[in-house]
Amino acid sequence: MPTQFITDKSGKRIAVILPIAEYRALQEDLQDWAAIAERRTEPTVPFADVVARLHRRVASATPCP
């Protein structure tokens, strides 16, 4: 189903009709952007530190039987 528009008497687009799947994807994107905005001031961890931490975690993990 293509995106459809509702127009006023002069032909100006005033609303949009989206497939539910597309609407839900947009909602999810909006939630992601809101989370990013909320966490913007949190301190960051350098990529190299994250990689080192993961290597240490893997090295200390107990192997599966």
Image (cartoon, rainbow, N blue to C red):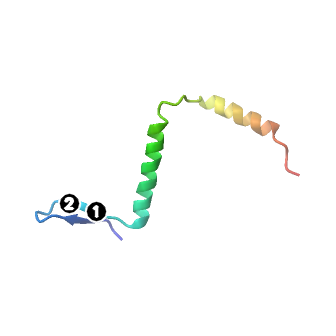
Q: Secondary structure at mark 2?
A: strand
Q: Are marks 2 and 1 in contact (CB under 8 Å)?
A: yes
Residue 20: give x, y in percent of width and height.
41, 66
Out of 11 and 41, give the one closest to the viewer.
41
As drawn, the residue found furthest toward the bottom would be 1
Q: Nearer the viewer, residue 60 or 34?
A: 34
Dot 1 amino acid type: Val
Q: Which mark is residue 13?
A: 2
Identified at 59% across, 29% down, the residue is 45
Task: Name the residue tied to disc 1.
Answer: 16
- State the residue at coordinates (80%, 37%): 59
Horizontal relation, residue 10 to residue 30: left or right: left
Picture quarter with the N terminus? bottom left
Residue found at the far left of this picture: 10
The quarter of the displayed image where residue 14 is located? bottom left
Residue most toward the right?
Answer: 65
Residue 17 x %, y %: 31, 66
Q: Amino acid at mark 2?
A: Arg
Q: Residue at x 71, y 36 (%)?
A: 54
State the residue in front, 39 or 54: 39
Location of residue 62 in the rendering, given as x and y in whole percent from the top left corner: 85, 43
Task: Name the residue at the front extreme.
Answer: 38
